[in-house]
Image: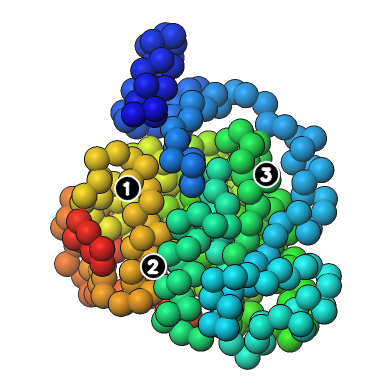
Amino acid sequence: MKCVLLLSIVVAVCTASVIKDPFGGYQEGDRYFFLPGDGDGMIHLVDAEEPADEEFIEEYTRNPNNNAYWLFTRSNQNSHQVLRNGDANSVRNSNFSFSKITVFLAHGWNGNGRNEMNVLLRQAFLQNADVNVIVVDWSELANRSYNTAKGGTAEVGRGLGRFVNWLVGLGMSYDRVHLVGFSLGGHLVGNAGRETSSRVRRITALDPAGPLWNNDRNRIVRSDGRYVEVIHTDTTMLGFSDPCGDADFYPNGGSNMPGCLVNSCSHGRAYEYMASTVKHNHLRANQCADLREATRDRCTGTLNPMGNADLNKSRAGIYRVNTGRNYPF
């Protein structure tokens, strides 16, 4: 109710010609648009011309330990252990195992290490297999304005990449690394992979953020890892619409997810689908000739599983799967 009231007030005081309908979509070049936060449940008015706080971005990113790295394993599923970049004892004295797969999770704008996306995914990965899960909490920067958070996303990602490189120096293998990011976090993990010279085995971007990213060279691309998968669930407003990975999945055509009435729900379906497929590996998508076929539900190509935890996936292309309205979809 508060959210609806806030929107009513904002729309009432702004000129209709410059403030778009918050549910009417976003197009690159729009000055004003509405975005939900990843974790706060609120809808925020964004001014694309508002300057990013470059001083804060530089202050935050110059210290790699401003990113918090929280380790969860089957021995500590609900209470994290803190790993510190450069502090080998923080790793040696933890439950981290160099012989296991390591999954990194990165949240988006206004998110944090304890939000729903992180909880669902960490539980799914730990239930599926005995792995290391490292949650990347960059909330101090992510909870600034959208322009500031976006402006720092690439450098935070590069910091994560340097952390991965450091762990490899201690004994971890790039072959056992899976980077998973939602919204701004989708671009973040792309930059992390790039920082490792694209040696990480798999990157999964969950509806990577769309607004202001079309012409940004720091957005996720297929060369960021050895295999890059992208799941698009809100191509009309909040997520990036064009194919940008080795494999791009457009469940239900990429927008208006079943059971959702607003864009923020469709956006969040990306990590819900991911969590579900990690546990069940049941959403099999048909390959499409092109994006037009995917949006029109005319894909009849061979099946390929969307999401899941498989580090050996390799098939490229555009895919569509139709899902149910409710978990496990």
Considering every residue shown, the one lying at the far bottom of the view is 99
Write down the residue under mark 2.
275
The image quadrant where one finds the N terminus is top left
The amino acid marked with disc number 3 is: Leu
| Crowd class of label 2 (few under 14; some 14 to 19; many from 20; radius 10 Å) | many
**194 vs 61, nearest the viewer:** 61
**70 vs 145, nearest the viewer:** 70
Marks 1 and 2, how far apart at CA: 15 Å
* Quadrant in the picture for residue 190: bottom right
Write down the residue under mark 1.
266
Q: Position of residue 321 (x, y in %)?
A: 23, 63
Residue 20 can be seen in this image: no
Marks 3 and 1, how far apart at CA: 25 Å
Does the CB distance between marks 2 and 3 fall below 8 Å? no
Residue 68 can be seen in this image: yes
Write down the residue under mark 3.
141
Q: Position of residue 95 (x, y in %)?
A: 66, 83
Which residue: 63% across, 48% down?
A: 139
Left or right placement of residue 74 versus residue 258 in this view:
right
Marks 2 and 3, how far apart at CA: 26 Å
Which residue: 55% across, 64% down?
A: 105
Marked residue nearer the N-terminal end (3 or 1): 3
- 104 versus 174 height, above or below: above
Label 1: which secondary element: helix
The amino acid marked with disc number 2 is: Ala
